[in-house]
Amino acid sequence: MQVRTRHSPSFGVARLVLAAGEVARTGSEAMANSYGVTSSSARGAGKRGPGRFGLGGGSASEWSYTAGPQGGWVDVAPSFPGDVHTVEMDGRRGWCVARRSWLAAAGTVRLDAGWNGFRELFGGQPGFLAHASGQGQLVLACCGALDVHELQPGQFVTMDAGHLVAYVDTLQCRLRQSEQGRAQSMRTGDGLVVDFAGPGRVVAQSRNPHRMTSWSQRGGSGR
C-alpha cells in the first residue's frame, strides 16, 4: 500500500493506493474508492478474527477494502479538521496509538488494545491507546495541527493525554493524573498526562478531540 496525502495541513485526506488483491483497513467508512474495490465492515466490540484489529472496547467500526485485479485506491479523512501523518512500520519497532487517531493501515499492520506493554499503564482496564505492529503504512489522524517531538537520550516531555497521537513503543513513559482531585478517564485520557523519556518520537495534535466534541455539543459556547 502507498499513501498519498492532499489538502494538508488543515483538512487532510489520505489516498490509499493498492496493488491487485491488496487490503487496507480503516477506522471509518471511506469517502470514496475506485471502481472494483470491494469493502466489508467488522462491527462488534471485543470480537476478534482474521483481519480484525481487535480494538474492541466500544471502538468505532472497522472497514476493510480489497483491490481488484487492476488495483485501485481508497480515500479516507479524519472526523475532525486537521492533518494526516503516515508512519512506515518496519516490523521491528512498534507504535502506541491513541484509538481516535488511527485512520488507516495496510493489511499487514495489526492494532491491539490488549498489548502486554499497557499493563503498567492501564492495569486490567481498557485504555485510550492501541499498539501497532507489523510492516507497512500506518496513517494517523490529527485533530488540528501536527506536532512532532524528537526526544534525545536524557530529554523529557510531558504531554496532555488528549493531545497525544502516537509514540514509538521504545520510549519510557509514565501515566499520571494531571492535577489532584480532577476527574480522569482511562478510556478517553481526560484528566491524564504522560511523561516521556527519550530517545524516541512522540506525535501530538494541537486540539483535543474529546474537548472539541464537548465544545460542539454545547453549541460552541464556553471553553
Image: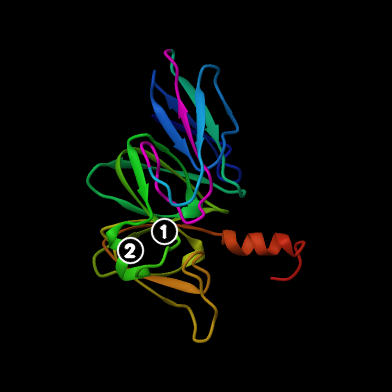
In the rendered image, residue 85, in percent from the top left (x then y), is placed at: 45, 45
The span picked out in magenta is 49-69
In the rendered image, residue 38, in percent from the top left (x then y), is placed at: 50, 23
What's the amino acid at mark 2? Phe
Q: Tell which of 33 and 43 is nearer to you.
A: 43
Question: Residue reaching furthest bottom?
Answer: 180
Mark number for residue 129?
1
Report the residue at 43% width, 32% height from top.
24
Q: Quadrant of the N terminus?
A: top left
Q: Given contact means CB atoms under 8 Å apart, are the residues at marks 1 and 2 in contact?
A: yes
Report the residue at 49% width, 83% height from top.
179
Q: Quadrant of the C terminus?
A: bottom right
In the rendered image, residue 39, in percent from the top left (x then y), is placed at: 51, 28
Report the residue at 44% width, 52% height from top.
46
The answer to whether one can see residue 210 in this image is yes
In the rendered image, residue 36, in percent from the top left (x then y), is placed at: 52, 17
Q: Is residue 194 left or right of residue 90?
A: right
Q: Is residue 67 above or below residue 115?
A: above
What's the amino acid at mark 1? Leu
Q: Which residue is mark 2?
A: 118
| C-alpha gap between disc 1 and disc 2 | 8 Å
